[in-house]
Amino acid sequence: MRPNHLNSYFSSLSSLKGVGPKMAQAFAKLLRGDVLLEPRRIDLLLHMPVSVIDRNLRSSLAMTPDGVIVTVKVTIDKHLPPPRNNKRVPYRILAHDETEELTLTYFHAKGGYLERQMPVGEVRYVSGRLERFQGAPQITHPDYVVDEDDFATLPLIEPVYPLTAGVSGKLVHKTLLAAFEGLEPLPEWQDGVLLDREHWPSFLDALHTLHAPMGLDDLAFESPARQRLAYDECLASQLALSLVRSNVKKVAGLARRWDGRLKTALIAALPFTLTGSQQSAIADIEADLGVAERMLRLVQGDVGSGKTMVALIAAADVIESGSQACMMAPTDLLARQHFQSVKGLCETVGIRVAVLTGKDTAATKRTTLAALHNGDIDFLIGTHALFQQSVDFADLGLAIVDEQHRFGVHQRLALSSKGQATDLLVMTATPIPRTLVLTHYGDMDVSLLTEKPAGRKPIDTRTMSVDRLGELVARLDQALAQGAKCYWVCPLVEESEVLEVTAAQERFESLKPVFGHKVELIHGRMTSEEKRTAMDRFKDGDAQILVATTVIEVGVDVPEATIMVIEHAERFGLAQLHQLRGRVGRGDRASSCILLFQGPLGAIAKERLKMMRETEDGFEIAEADLRLRGEGDVLGTKQSGMPGFRLADAEAHKGLMEMARKEARLIVEKDPQLEGSRGKALRDLLYLFERESAIRLLKSG
Ligand code: ADP
Ligand code: MG
């Protein structure tokens, strides 16, 4: 339960004066992305301004150029209401200072209100954007009109916030003033020495500074206030991950013993030799398995780097040591594909392997589950169906999670909690920069697969305007005659899967007259049975072109495919293009990738396509992606900024994240239950940044 002294931070904005139900909904949309959630004070307090309007500029009318926001001191001369029968004529008020006349213009105005606000003959401070019409200065709907007394309260430097319909900047400002009132001061959770050294203010002072900045400098990523809050956020996140980690590690792992018989047999059965990267990843894993601590390892490797083989050997080791292993893939199709690709090898060396997905019949499932429980299955491959309660392993020793970023931290933990001392191996194909590894996987050990399997030819990547589709089809015809296989990926339609499917169907129909039975179609709306049939026809049958929506994005493995056509490549992100391209170039034949685009291209799209032509290095591409689109999209999420973070910026606060990781480890070492006085304050921090699920892991939480 959240401690009471935090209540003021989590109370609803609708409990503040002046915030009605409609407004609360608009705030909910803005602050929490959903009108059904309660907008709380903390959400608003952590809603950061992105810029400032400087209303300091107080100048004479004559000196103010066109289009600038000013604050001017004027005397009101005359009200000119519109004629009664013509609502389209604006209400005008004439005023002057020593230098010039000013017209204030209001559309659909309430005359009575304006007359009370600006009585003729009185002096008023007016702030807004000044525009000149034939030289004459005019302000339409001024932002502020105040008298001498209220001028003192006018925010001369006005923070500018991201807004949404129904929430104006003025409303945010007003509501923030109310939100700051009556907040309970909190004990400091940061180390005093650190605060002194960095000249960082307290949490509340930092919030004050950012919402009432003295200038743009206060909002910069490197301002002390912003850094303090970003560090708070980083520490909350890293502390939560450290607590999870220590919790997992607390359950002692097994020091496994095996002599490598299965591994040797597997390697002997392979038609290739392992790459150096694969060998060293396997060595890392084997070292982890051999000590009495649970393994928490991330294997990061570009598409086609051969992660499956690493996973299989890890599984073989654990199986030989007497336990079971399982591997989880994000989709049914992928799970079955993994199964197909390892089945032969497993049978050769005597590993009993099975597959379990949500699509199995009840009878099949029953048989599989019984065999699993009895220990008659060594290696189970499946989808998230593996999480279900009814899945009961005899002795799960190793959980492997493939294509990780589609699963959350809690899911991963749920899987590893299925065994007594289950080791955990996570594999991701998205090359993620170090900062994001930290924020998403926490303090995991990392093995990198940097080498591509030998014999891989570089992929010839070209861009081509969609106007030249006819030319492409003719060339494709020649390539198919020589036995080539080709993926044809249809455009990404962000708003709608239905539209995406329609596009793929249409492309399929238009290629059919040319290529006949050589074209096959696969999309996300098909049943898994239909998908499997289509895949099989492409992999082993006579289909040579597979028209697809982005369902083939992850993991599909058809080494004979050598051509990748991506339609409307300009709509895809870099990471996605790279993933898709990785579907070809897996065999030893030369491959090509054709990026069809629809011009004219924006600057960023141009840069992305250029990047694709120039490099195949996944890490380089990931860095470029981060630069070009903001971190949110690297992981395929749509929000801007670092996913799950409101204040910290992946680029600007890299150093802080690293610092927070180290500090979090120290904190958990010294005070694993967060019981000391700083520990208690740190619990507040976890609540404020909504990382409190980690507190449930603590004894006295
Ligand atoms: P990913 O890392 O994308 O999961 P896979 O494990 O699916 O890659 O491997 C891609 C392809 O490369 C598969 O066909 C696999 O059999 C093959 N492969 C894996 N390791 C090697 C290697 N050392 N040499 C040659 N081919 C390999
Ligand atoms: Mg894979």
Image: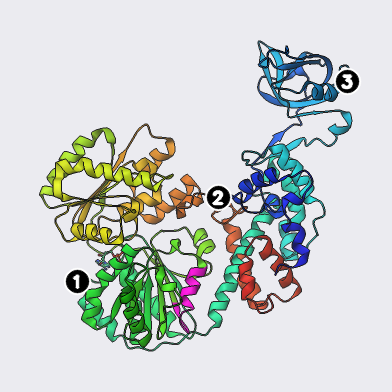
Residue at (80%, 23%) from the top-left corner?
A: 114
Question: Can I make out residue 73 in this image?
Answer: no
* Residue 373, label in figure: none
Residue under the point 46% across and 74% down: 415
Decide: few, some or many residues near mark 3? Use Cα within 10 Å; few <14, some 14-19, many ≥20.
few
162 in relation to 86, above or below? below
Tag 1: residue type? Pro
- Residue at mark 1: 271
Mark earlier in primary sequence (1, 3): 3
| The N terminus: image quadrant | bottom right
- Name the residue beneath numbered marker 3: 122
Helix, strand or loop at label 3? It is loop
Q: Secondary structure at mark 1?
A: loop
Magenta run includes residue 411:
yes
Q: Between 200 and 335, which is closer to the camera in this rendering?
A: 335
The region drawn magenta spans: 410-423
Q: CA distance from mark 1 to mark 3?
A: 92 Å
On the rendered structure, is 684 left or right of 352? right
Q: Which amino acid, mark 2?
A: Gly
Q: Nearer the viewer, mark 2 or mark 3?
A: 3
Q: Is mark 1 within 8 Å of ligand 1?
A: yes
Q: Give how far across and how far down residue 473 sits, in percent.
A: 18, 40
Residue holding disc 2: 641
Say what amino acid the circle numbered 3 marks: Glu
Q: Do the residues under discs 1 and 3 have CB atoms within 8 angstroms?
A: no
Q: Secondary structure at mark 2?
A: loop
Label 1 Cα crowd, 10 Å radius (few <14 / some 14-19 / many 20+) = few
Q: Select label 1 or label 3 by which is in front.
A: 3
Tag nearer the camera, 2 or 1: 2
Q: Quick check: can you spot residue 227?
A: yes
- In x, y percent, where is residue 100? 78, 13
Tell me where residue 240 appears, x and y as whole percent. Answer: 60, 68
